[in-house]
Image (spheres, rainbow, N blue to C red):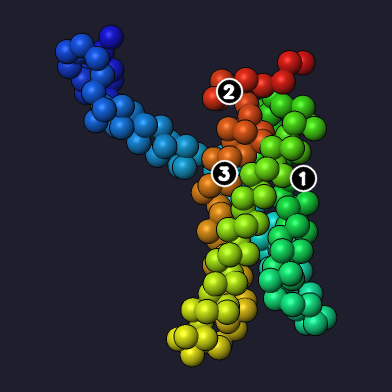
Amino acid sequence: MCLELLGGAVPCFGEITAPMRLGVFMKKLIRLFFSGQFLAFLGAGALAALVNFLVRILLSRAGMEYSLAVALAYLAGMVVAFILFYKLVFRNNTNSLGRSLFGFVMVNFLGILLTVAVSSLLYYLVFPALDFAFYSGEIAHFLGISTTSVSSFIGHKFFSFREAGTAGTADPQ
């Protein structure tokens, strides 16, 4: 079987080679990240991140320890994100609400670990070592939140809010 790759036929000489598979994979990946769904995900995610960011500032100003404030703010952002993703971004979701919620929590469990780790590493170690104090908590938290956008999209698209025709099987209706 021959493949059409980037507008030209790929020669058929037995099995598909690893570079050919990589080319097909890269083409699908590019299509995935230049889709309207990814843009909607980024918009909804930006709103959820704003909630996350503002809640952390409020908690910090109320005297809460930085890493705990980052973790609790992340949970507030998760609630907003789940509602927006479920209702607006992944409308063709074939998972049940319960399965979507479970997948969402699992994907975000990894995200919260990454967000807290990056934010805390920057805030407690990197920025003090650089003598950087200008909104260091806010910048560290923003960078921590930003690190999860691509991995979260992939996790939510193919696990939390799986659509017909994507990897795996959906809940039976």
Dot in front, 3 or 2: 2
Against 57, residue 36 (above or below) is above
Distance CA(mark 2)–CA(mark 1): 23 Å
* Coordinates of residue 127 in the picture (x, y in percent): 51, 82
Q: CA distance from mark 1 to mark 3?
A: 15 Å
Viewer-nearest residue: 48 or 122: 122
Callout 1: 10 Å neighbours few (<14), some, many (20+)?
some
In the image shown, does 116 or 34 lie closer to the viewer? 116
Q: Is residue 119 above or below residue 123?
A: above
Mark 3, Cα crowd under 10 Å, few <14 / some 14-19 / many 20+, is many
Q: Amino acid at mark 2?
A: Gly
Percent position (x, y) of residue 71?
Answer: 71, 64
Residue closer to the observer: 18 or 138: 18
Give the residue number, with chain letter if any, for mark 3.
153
Residue 133: x and y in percent read 55, 88
How many discs mark residues in the rendered view? 3
- The amino acid sitting under disc 3 is Phe
Tell us which disc is closer to us: 2 or 1: 2
Q: Position of residue 72 (x, y in %)?
A: 76, 64
Q: Residue at x 73, y 34 (%)?
A: 100
Q: Earlier in the sequence, mark 3 or mark 2?
A: 3
Question: Which is nearer the N-term, disc 1 or disc 3?
Answer: 1
Q: Are marks 3 and 2 in contact (CB under 8 Å)?
A: no
Quadrant including the C terminus: top right
Q: In the image, which disc is placed on residue 83?
A: 1
